C-alpha cells in the first residue's frame, strides 16, 4: 500500500473550509497553557491532561472531526518509542503477503518505502498542512495509526517497559537537538518530565492503562502486545497479528515458513539495513525526518546504561503504584 492520495485539488470552497477548520483548531490549541517537556516541540496542555506539540495536536483534532473509521480498519496505537516502527513493519507484509512475498526481501516495497510511509500517521502525516486525505481509495483492511474509539475497528497496541521507553525517547529527542544545534535534555530533566507526563505523547502510564483496560474489555477488538515479548518470540506475535486482522496463516504458508520470513524481513538488522531506511526520509509537519531515526539499538533493558539506581527506584515506584492490581504483570 502506498500513501493515500491527498485531495490535492479540492474545490475552492472545500479548501477554504479545511483551512478554516485547521485555523480554528490552531487558535484553540495556541490558547492552552504551554510547557517544555521531553520533546523537541513545545507541549500544550489539553483539557484531558495530555500534552503534544501544536501541529500533532491540531492534526489529532482534525482527524477526530473528519476521520470515519470502518469496522475493517486496523489502527496502530502505541506510545511513541515503544515499537511503532516495528509493529507497522510487521503488519504491512502480514496483510500484503500475497502481493509481496516476504521471503523475496530484495523485491519488497520496504526497499523503497519505510514503515511510516507504508502506514501513515493520522495526526502527523494524513491530517496536516491544511489538507484532508482521501482515504476511501485505500485497499481494505486499511492500516492506520492511532485509535478511534467507538468505531468498531481493530486496534493493535504495543507497550514497552517504561524505563526503556523513556531512554529511547530521550535519545531520539537529543539526536534531533544535536542535529539542530539545540541544547541537549539531561537525563535528570528527562526523568522529571517523564514522571510528570510531560512528553510529546502525554503521560505514559495512563496511556498504557487505557489500552490495557480496553483490551481486557474487548480482546477481539484491541490486541495488546509488549515489545519485550515480541523480542522473545516474534513469530508467535506475527501469527497472532495475522489471526487478529482476519488473515491467519494457512497450513501451506506455515509449511513454507511465511511467518518466519516476515520476522526476518522486519527484524531490526534487516529493516535498519534497507536503503529506504539508510537514505529515505518521511515528511512530517516538523520537516523531513530521516527514516534511520526510528532505528537506534532495538534492545531490551538499555535503560540500565543510562539511569541511576535512584531514577530506577523512582520510575519503578510509579509503575508499581499505577499498574498494581491492573493485571499488567511486571515487565522483563
Ligand atoms: P531504541 O531507541 O531503544 O533502540 P518507535 O518506532 O515507537 O518510535 O520506537 C523506536 C524504538 O523501536 C527504538 O528503540 C528502535 O530502535 C526500536 N525498533 C525499531 N525498529 C525495530 C525492529 N524492527 N525491531 C526491534 N526494535 C525496533
Image (cartoon, rainbow, N blue to C red):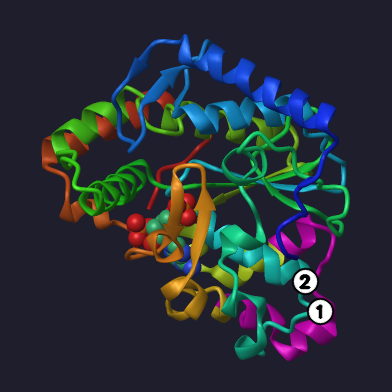
Q: Is mark 1 within 8 Å of ligand 1?
A: no
The residue that disc 1 covers is 99
**Mark 2 element type:** loop
Q: Position of residue 191 (x, y in %)?
A: 23, 33
Residue 188 quadrant:
top left
Point 83% across, 82% down: residue: 251
* Residue found 75% across the figure and 26% down from its top: 16
Pinpoint residue 177: horizontal percent, then vertical percent.
Answer: 24, 46
Residue 332 lies, in percent from the top left, at 37, 53
Q: Which quarter of the rendered image does ligand 1 occupy?
A: bottom left
Question: In the rendered view, does 217 fall on the left or right side of 234?
Answer: right
User: In the displayed structure, does residue 101 sit left or right of residue 292?
Assistant: right
Q: Which residues are magenta?
A: 241-263
Q: Nearer the viewer, residue 250 or 155?
A: 155
Contact, mark 1 vs mark 2 (Cβ under 8 Å): yes
Indicate the quadrant containing the N terminus: top left, top right, bottom left or bottom right: bottom right
Q: What numbered label is drawn on residue 96?
A: 2
- Answer above or below: position of 230 versus 320: below
* SS majority, magenta: helix
Q: Nearer the viewer, residue 234 or 195?
A: 195
Residue at (56%, 42%) from the top-left corner? 124
Amino acid at each position: 500500500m502506498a500513501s493515500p492520495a491527498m485531495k490535492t485539488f479540492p474545490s475552492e470552497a472545500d479548501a477554504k473550509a479545511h483551512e478554516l477548520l485547521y485555523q480554528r483548531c490552531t487558535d484553540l490549541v495556541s490558547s492552552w497553557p504551554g510547557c517544555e517537556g521531553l520533546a523537541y516541540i513545545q507541549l500544550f496542555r489539553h483539557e484531558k491532561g495530555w500534552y503534544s506539540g501544536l501541529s500533532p495536536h491540531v492534526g489529532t483534532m482534525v482527524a477526530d472531526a473528519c476521520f470515519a473509521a470502518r469496522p475493517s480498519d486496523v489502527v496502530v496505537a502505541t506510545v511513541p518509542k515503544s515499537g511503532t516502527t516495528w509493529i507497522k513493519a510487521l503488519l504491512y507484509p502480514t496483510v500484503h503477503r500475497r502481493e509481496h512475498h516476504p521471503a523475496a526481501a530484495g523485491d519488497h516495497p520496504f526497499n523503497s518505502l519505510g514503515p511510516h510511509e507504508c502506514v501513515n500517521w493520522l495526526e502527523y502525516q494524513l491530517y496536516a498542512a491544511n489538507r484532508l486525505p482521501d482515504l476511501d481509495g485505500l485497499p481494505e483492511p486499511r492500516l492506520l495509526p492511532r485509535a478511534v474509539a467507538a468505531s468498531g475497528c481493530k486496534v493493535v497496541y504495543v507497550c514497552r517497559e517504561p524505563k526503556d521507553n523513556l531512554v529511547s525517547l530521550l535519545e531520539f529527542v537529543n539526536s534531533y537537538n544535536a542535529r539542530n544545534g539545540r541544547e541537549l535534555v539531561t537525563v535528570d530533566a528527562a526523568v522529571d518530565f517523564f514522571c510528570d507526563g510531560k512528553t510529546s505523547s502525554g503521560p505514559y502510564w495512563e496511556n498504557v492503562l487505557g489500552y490495557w483496560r480496553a483490551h481486557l474489555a474487548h480482546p477481539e477488538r484491541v490486541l495488546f502486545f509488549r515489545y519485550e515479548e515480541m523480542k522473545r518470540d516474534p513469530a508467535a506475535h506475527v501469527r497472532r497479528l495475522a489471526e487478529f486482522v482476519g488473515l491467519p496463516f494457512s497450513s501451506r504458508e506455515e509449511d513454507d515458513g511465511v511467518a518466519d520470513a516476515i520476522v526476518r524481513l522486519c527484524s531490526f538488522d534487516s529493516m535498519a539495513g534497507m536503503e529506504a531506511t539508510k537514505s529515505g526520509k518521511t515528511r512530517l509537519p516538523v520537516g523531513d525526518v530521516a527514516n534511520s531515526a526510528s532505528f537506534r539499538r532495538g534492545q531490551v533493558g538499555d535503560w540500565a546504561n543510562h539511569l541511576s539506581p535512584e531514577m530506577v527506584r523512582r520510575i519503578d515506584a510509579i509503575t508499581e503504584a499505577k499498574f498494581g492490581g491492573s493485571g499488567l504483570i511486571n515487565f522483563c
